[in-house]
Amino acid sequence: MTTAVPFANVGRPSERLGTLEEKHRIPLPPPYDKDEEPPLPQLSAQVRAACECSLDDTVAVSLPRPASPEAEEALVKSFLAGLDKLFSEANNWTFLEPLVLSIEHCAKCQTCAEACHIFVESGRNELYRPTFRSEILRRLYFKHKSGGSLVSRFQHGDIDINWTTIARLLELAYRCNLCRRCAQTCPIGVDNGLLAHEIRKLFSMELGIAPKEIHEKGSLLQLRVGSSTGMSPAAVKDNIDFIDQDMSEKTGIPVKTRWDVAGADVLLMHNAGEILAWPENPGAFALILDAAGISWTLSSELVGYDAINYGLWYDDAQFARVAVKHAQIARKLGVKKLVIGECGHAHKSMMVIADRVLTGELNIPRESSMTLLDDIVASGKLKLDPTRNDFPVTLHDPCNVVRLMGVVEPQRRILRQIAPRFREMTPHGVDNYCCGGGSGFAIMSGHNFADWRMRVASRRKFRQILEAFADDLDPKHPKYVCAPCSNCKGAIRDILKRYRAWERVGIHYGGLAELIVNAMADVKPGFINFSEL
Amino acid sequence: MVLVFVPYLAAAVFVAAVVIRWVKIARLPVHLRWELYPVAHERNSAYGGSFFERLDWWKHHPPTSRMGELKVMVPEMLLLTGVHEHDRALWFRSYPFHLGLYLLAGFIGLLLAGAIAQTFGARIEAGWLPTTTTVVGVAGLVLLAAGSLGLLLRRLASPALRAHSAAADFANLIFFFTAAVLGLVTFATVDRDFASLRLFVRALVTFQPAGEMPALVAIEIVVVSALAAYIPLTHMSHFFTKWFMYHDVRWNDEVNQVGSKLEAAIGRQLGHKVDWSAPHIRGDGKKTWVDVATERVSDSGLRPVELDAGDGKNPPRVLSQKEIGKP
Ligand code: SF4
Ligand code: SF4
């Protein structure tokens, strides 16, 4: 455990408030236990001089330092105005009740700390304690609200209201995966993940400050050009054409995606990142849905071919815009239901959070692809040969699909049917650990942030993966981490690559639909081809 | 005589604080769903499953079980099962503390019951009530003293807990500890069998002046009354706000159905005016949430355009730089 950070230090300028200390960290399981972890690449002096990065060893937002004390003052003012709005019904009815409850009732017992993978895997670095950022927000709120009265300081503690505190709070909001595992353990029901989410919102919605990967190059880009990948409708059609051809060749079964079919039973929405990074996943979906005789379609309308909704992580306005767009597209096509592909945050966005945004005719039926695939596999419409998946398989539970939505069993039922050597991670299901890529981390890679993510946020997942396959770590024996979520897949890809897990212990990863296709008896054997890796 | 008013005043503050906080929370607007699984009333809550696991889930009535909620909530309240599961060391301190409080609440109830019974002429001296009252009271005081001391020492000993505590977090525990120890000392020295306290409670329920009593008993009455009034003014109001945390947030998976009351409430709230100032919103208190959710985003920020009616007449497209103009 590193030394406690007094809240009095939070507002005092210093190069950094804390640092990652290797000596406190828990070693990884074999064969990585003997490895010397190279130090985290340091931010350069230029970056330190130019950006607000006085929290720790990394930087998520890369906010330019204010040019003058007056500029700092103006930012502090804006922040406080945002704080007022955050607690107002008109501006934040969306989360006001959970926010008020969590702000007012923390007993500071710290039961939640040990549930957090970031805190524990950082060597219990105090900066990453789930309550650290919450407590800063809480103290700022009560001090601001009471005008800094003595009673309030006695009751809630003190903190400096200045730019240093606020700039550190901004970065702290991006040291949390919003996985809400901590909230599960809070005996009172306080939700530190929610508070991180609300801090992000305040900065984005009042000051326009958010990591560029999720705002400018993420949800703004999606609304402007159709997808955060930058793909135009023509480009997405081209790419899918190519995927169809490739799938047809690889599987021996002709695959042809249909676009914009009015009245189809299913409008399928993928995270468009799949199309570029893991084309076999949308390809596998196309093949499975065809083989099951389902009438389905993709949309080529702007925003309609990308299921992502990054607003979920940081901005209610951006969230609502994308959710409304998705619903409008489904309604316009007149489909019976909108099915979300293997993308966790898109699941939660559209099925849970958007539920109280979409009213009237925009409230179209929305379903998880896990459920649909489960039904297809159970129906016997596919001829399956599980022996084709005769390698160890473990399942990663995307937080958004499982802990935050309760879709737990469908994907397991499928695996039990098609993967004879399926084994669970410990813990799993609603108690799972985040992959470390949650809440935007998987796509955020400014400066050394991706390095920090792999070193801290994804470390618990890597530990769990190694433990799940501990019975056979021979690199000649391929093993498969099934991660039915694009962002999780990205994070798992990166961590496996960083530790050369394929070369050293034979661990690979992929989606669920690919495993199903790999088990289809009518498909040419070897759809998942480990020898090509 | 003044002393008789103290518990009444404390009870009035207690009730007012609970009611005000309760009403304040209950009147907060409907929020977006933010449930956390397992959701106790779900049919598959044993493993955290939800109605979303079912194909075409909207065609089936969401299976809910109030019993499921009780099965979680009752042991949680009586045994602090959450703390027991997630932080055993804390439980060994927190549980005696909470159990002590429960017993003391019971003790007050028994004292009142005895006093009321006597007022109506019942002869309870030889029955089970006085002994039970004494046992419950002493057990409550011992547990509260031990628990609050344990929690205080834990908070002092851990640098992290210390750093996260405000002055009130220590003061509150000292307050509880003092009240409990004072009660025990009073019992052990000047008020064997709580005889004076019983007389006082009798005076309380009959609105008679309290007779002579040892100073320690009077101090104890003032301290306990102050403590009772203080609790709901602080974060310790979680003894009832927890209901909202679980029921309204963690387990609130109510589906928004077309034509429902919930939908009507959402509709009203979507009409609220937004004044978030970020460049991609520019609320200015003029736009509603509906405006914000349906305006078109352009290269330079925002350009409100008519909502695509879904009839293909106004299909979405990327606006040209000329159309966008200056932000
Ligand atoms: S959030 Fe909950 S578990 Fe964490 S310190 Fe606060 S009351 Fe305790
Ligand atoms: S939400 Fe997840 S990452 Fe964030 S503090 Fe809680 S456990 Fe840690």
Image: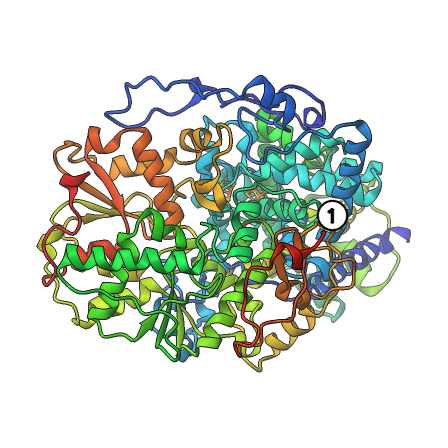
Q: Residue at x 57, y 40 (%)?
A: A211
Q: Which residue is drawn at 36% across and 20% down?
A: A37
Q: Residue at x 66, y 68 (%)?
A: B290
Model colouring: rainbow
Please give the residue where the numbered disc 1 appears in the rendered image: A82
- Give the image quadrant in which the ligand numbered 1 is located: top right
Point out residue A204 in the picture as x, y percentages from the top left corner: 65, 47
Q: In which quarter of the image is residue A151?
A: top right
Point out residue A315 in the picture as x, y percentages from the top left corner: 60, 52
- Front residue of B155 and B299: B299
Left or right of A407 in this view: A230: right
Q: Which SS class for mark 1? A: helix
The residue positioned farthest toward the bottom in the image shown: B259
Vertical comparison of A291 with B274: above or below: below
Q: In which quarter of the image is residue A451?
A: top left
Point out residue B31 in the picture as x, y percentages from the top left corner: 62, 63
* Res. A112 visible in picture: yes
The chain identifier of the residue carrying mark 1 reads A
Residue type at mark 1 is Gly
Point out residue B71 in the picture as x, y percentages from the top left corner: 44, 62
Q: Residues within 10 Å of mark 1 (few under 14, many from 20)?
A: many
- Front residue of B184 and B313: B313
Total numbered labels placed on residues in the image = 1
